[in-house]
Image (tube, rainbow, N blue to C red):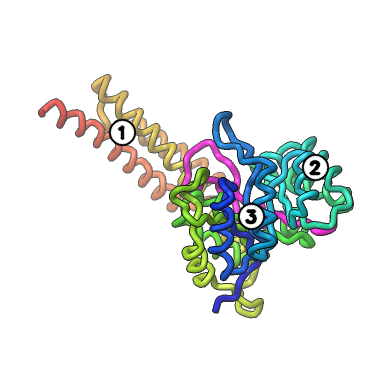
Amino acid sequence: MYKKPFLIAGPCSAETENQVLETAKSLKHIQPDYFRAGIWKPRTRPGEFEGVGASGLEWLNKVQSEIGLKVATEVAKPEHVEAALNAKIDLVWIGARTTTNPFSVQELAEALSGVDIPVMVKNPVNPDLKLWIGAIERLSKSGIHSISAIHRGFSVYEKTLYRNNPNWQIPIDFMHEMPQIPIICDPSHIGGRRELLYDIAQKAMDLKYAGLMIETHFQPVHAWTDTKQQVDANLLSELLNKLKIRNHNEIEDSEILEFRAQLQTLDEDIIHLLRERKKVSELIGVFKKEHNLAVLQSSQYEETLKNNVLKAVESNLAKDFSIALFKLIHEESIHIQSEILKTDKKRETN
């Protein structure tokens, strides 16, 4: 039997009454702390499914009465808050897009003033720690006592391994700034794909997060939204059983884990930069082919290497390491350009 973390599970969107109830039934044996379902869905573009609206509250009430699970949903407007409170919803959260706007957060804080149900705040879409903390402070000043944070990752324009870059350093800094506020991880929105959920969840547990929010659907492949990141109850159970929830005397020093999180973020930045450099090398290869230029231009290479190593040494990097690194990068660039030229020659031959 696994040591279960605090858990919120349920579908991205409430689609139909049957879907909500069947998903809740499938989760009954896992006993999540809260069953989640979005009924108001802020979509990036108009025309996409924006949720069933207030009628979904009745389905969540059936989950409470017929299946015995506490329920949670996202609120983005004061009228959402009013409807959720009237329906006796057990927990509400503020989504990433809403957290980005202090005016919206303030309106929600006023609508929730004095409420005695738990309120959770997702990190803003953009990587801004102050916005996240500010949203929580607004709720706290409105007299809300049970406040938690949700780490769901941060948007980046370029494609990466993740749907939303975890940028672990920001939640680590959040925990230092607001140690009194529990934080849970939403690996579904960070990963965007089922196969990434376990590693993200384990990382969160190693960093002493309080729990997880994982999107779960009784038929994920038929989900109306976020199909790739949702799991069924069986996969969720497998994930939870694999998780290692270490005791404090078993876990590595938290400072070491924080350093490792910083290294991971930096490594991901390096990978991104190398990918962008590869794109430029490909463009150079095409240009050289079109203008019948030699792939290797020794004088340019020597000058570039000299300048890069000089800047690296000035930045307190070892000279031998810098020379080896930039030589390797240059060799890969030449290889990329040569392959482009070779491909074009093969086409001419054929």
Residue 275, x across and y down, in percent: 42, 41
- In what element is the residue under mark 3? strand
First in sequence, mark 3 or 1: give its number: 3
Q: Quadrant of the C terminus?
A: top left
Instruction: Return the residue at label 2.
Output: 108
Above or below, 108 against 205 in this view is above
Other-residue count near label 3 (Cα within 10 Å), few / some / many at <14 / 14–19 / ≥20: many
Mark 1, mark 2: which one is toward the viewer? 2
Viewer-side label of 2, 3: 3
In the picture, the disc for residue 36 is 3
Residues at badges 1 and 2 in contact (C-beta under 8 Å)? no
Q: Which residues are magenta?
A: 145-174
Label annotation for residue 22? none
Q: Which mark is residue 298?
A: 1
Marks 1/2: CA distance? 63 Å
Q: Amino acid at mark 1?
A: Ser
Residue 59: image location, x then y, percent: 65, 52
Observer-nearest of 23 and 152: 23
Cα separation, mark 3 vs mark 1, equals 61 Å
